[in-house]
Amino acid sequence: MAKRPEVVELDRELDWVVSIRRGQRRQLPPEGLENWCEKRKSSIRAKVEHPFHKVKLLFGYAKVRYRGLGKNTQRLDVLLGLGNLLTVGHQLAP
C-alpha cells in the first residue's frame, strides 16, 4: 500500500489492515492469533464481495460502457437491488 501514489501524497503514516498473501498464510501456525485475524479479514471480504460477484457474473455487468454517470449509477443500483432479491429468494426457498 505504501507504494501507491495516492498514499504517498498523504504525508503521514497510516496503519493499513491488509490481508497477507495465501502463500504467507500457509506458513502461519494453524492455532495462532495472527491466523485467526487473517481468517476474520477474509470472511468480512467474502461477505462484501459476494454481491458484486452476483452482479458481474449473473447480470453481466463486467464491462461498463459510458452512458453517462446517472445511467451507470442507476443501472448499478437496480442490479444490486436484484442481487438482494435473489439472495432473499434463496434464503426463503425451502
Image (cartoon, rainbow, N blue to C red):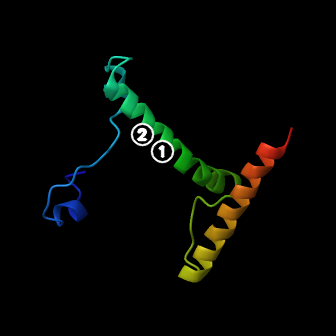
**12 or 78: which is nearer to us?**
12
Percent x, y of residue 68? 56, 82
Q: Is residue 34 above or below residue 46?
A: above
The residue that mark 1 highlights is 45
Q: Which residue is painted at 54% across and 80% down in the image? A: 69
Q: Is residue 10 left or right of residue 54?
A: left
Three-letter amino acid code at the position of disc 2: Lys
| Quadrant housing residue 7 | bottom left
Return the x and y of residue 22 as percentages of the image width and height.
38, 29
Q: Residues within 10 Å of mark 2 (few under 14, many from 20)?
A: some
Query: In the rendering, which numbered label is found on residue 28?
Result: none
**Image quarter hosting the C terminus:** top right
Answer few, some or many: residues within 10 Å of disc 1's Cα (few below 14, many 20 plus, some between 14 and 19).
few
Measured as percent of width and height from the top left, residue 31 is found at: 38, 17
In the foreground, 49 or 32: 32
In the depicted structure, whether residue 23 falls above or below residue 5: above
Asked if residue 79 can be seen in this view, the reply is yes
Q: Amino acid at mark 1?
A: Arg
* Labels 2 & 1 near each other (Cβ < 8 A): yes
Q: Residue at (33%, 17%) from the top-left corner?
A: 29
What's the residue at 18%, 65% (across, down)?
Answer: 10
* 28 lies left or right of 90: left
* Badge 2 element: helix
Query: What residue is shown at x 33% (from left), y 21% (from top)?
Result: 32
Q: Is residue 73 above or below residue 83?
A: below
SS category of the residue bearing label 1:
helix
Left or right for 80, reference 93: left
Q: Which residue is mark 2?
A: 41
